[in-house]
Image (cartoon, grey):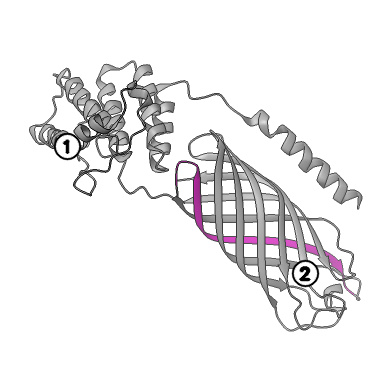
Amino acid sequence: MKSFKRSLTLLGASLVMLPALVFADPTTADEWYKEGEKQYTLQNFDKAAEAFKKGYDLETIEGKKAAYLYNVAQSYRMGQDCKKAQFFYKRYLAQRELNTAKPLSDKARKDVQDQIANLDECAKAQVVTQPVVKPEEDTTKVVDPKGKDVAVVEPEDPEEEDGITKPGVVTDQPKLVSARLIGGGSKITAGNLPVPVRGTGTLIAGYPLPINDKLTLELGGAFTVTSVAFESMAGSSRTASFVGLLANAGATYEVIPKLGIRGDLGLGGLFLSGASESPFTDNQPATGTLTMFHVRAAVSVDYAITPNLLATATPLAFSYSPPKEGLREDITAITRLDFMVGLGYRM
């Protein structure tokens, strides 16, 4: 019990210290570029445009500025703000004309000009339908009149965009994988059997599916492992392992920039190995691994340290499995309460 209280105290301290992990906004052009790339990937196109603008403001190398303008235009186009997209495509062309050492190819220039032309009807529609307000207050959303995305420009030469980013580096259908590794303490309940708090670890991986600028779903799988040491009737020290394999669905809601609340639900199997002649089987022999249905639910707090790296705290994860033949009679279910902290990575 003392160990359990100590673990809860450590968890509470970790949660209290979580805000201390908060870092300032990006301070360099490259950092703002990475922030814009992340927001574009998550389909937060307005945020992506603002990030690329800030990167443009901070960029000190003139030859690199055009790429930021192109990505601003791309972001507005994907956000269906045709008027602003047109404006920044034109600014991109004007900026590239200043680079006489490495001029834009005729094909690339024509492709951008075609995009501007394709957006013309949509931009005019926005001018008619929107109220007279400052450009930054424009919230009117008009779908591309052709009913499809304008093609992304691919440069003929990989070095054509000054080595920073090239037109088309941010794609229309972003794909990425998210993974997180967390660890902490686990309190297992199995009938009247006293089980102390044990160390536990969880690996979760999945494919994020942005729903809107705040909500992201993640479909994938989860792997959990918790080991419990015990002394056999013969007096030898042994270990029983609780291993969970689950299909997992997670949902993250961004409360404020960089800080989100996440919920997870997993269904799968619990595999109890090494439990033969253990207290879990009432010291009776068991053949092989005991397999049970397994359900897991968890809530977490995520903080984005960088566009790719996040810190996460899971104050509560609850698992349930019905009993399996071969377990001691007073075990009507195996439940587990976990509390963990860890790191996540998006790529």
How would you rate the neighbour count of disc 2 (Cα within 10 Å): few for under 14, some for 14-19, many for 20 or more? some
Marks 2/1: CA distance? 63 Å
Q: Name the main secondary structure of what is drawn in magenta.
A: strand
Name the spot of residue 184 as percent of width and height, x first: 73, 50
Q: Residue type at mark 2: give it.
A: Ile
Name the spot of residue 51 as percent of width and height, x first: 40, 28
Which residue is pictured at 72% across the width and 73% down the height?
273
Secondary structure under badge 2? strand
Q: Nearer the viewer, mark 2 or mark 1?
A: 1
Name the spot of residue 225 as percent of width and height, x first: 68, 61
Name the spot of residue 305 as percent of width and height, x first: 56, 34
Instruction: Give whichever of 25, 210 is nearer the camera.
Output: 210
Asked which quadrant contains residue 151, the reply is top left
Is residue 300 left or right of 92 when viewed as pictured? right
Residue 215 part of the magenta segment: yes
Is residue 191 left or right of 297 when viewed as pictured? right
Which residue is pictured at 49% across the width and 48% down the height?
216
Q: Residue type at mark 1: give it.
A: Glu
Q: Give the residue at mark 2.
A: 334
Q: Which residues are magenta?
A: 212-232
Is residue 250 left or right of 225 when viewed as pictured? left
* Res 326 seen here: yes
Q: Which mark is residue 121?
A: 1
Is residue 25 left or right of 226 when viewed as pictured? left
How would you rate the neighbour count of disc 1 (Cα within 10 Å): few for under 14, some for 14-19, many for 20 or more? some
- Going from the N terminus, do you reach mark 2 or mark 1 first? 1
Instruction: Give whichever of 130, 242 is nearer the camera.
Output: 130
Asked which quadrant contains residue 285, the reply is bottom right
| Count of numbered tags | 2
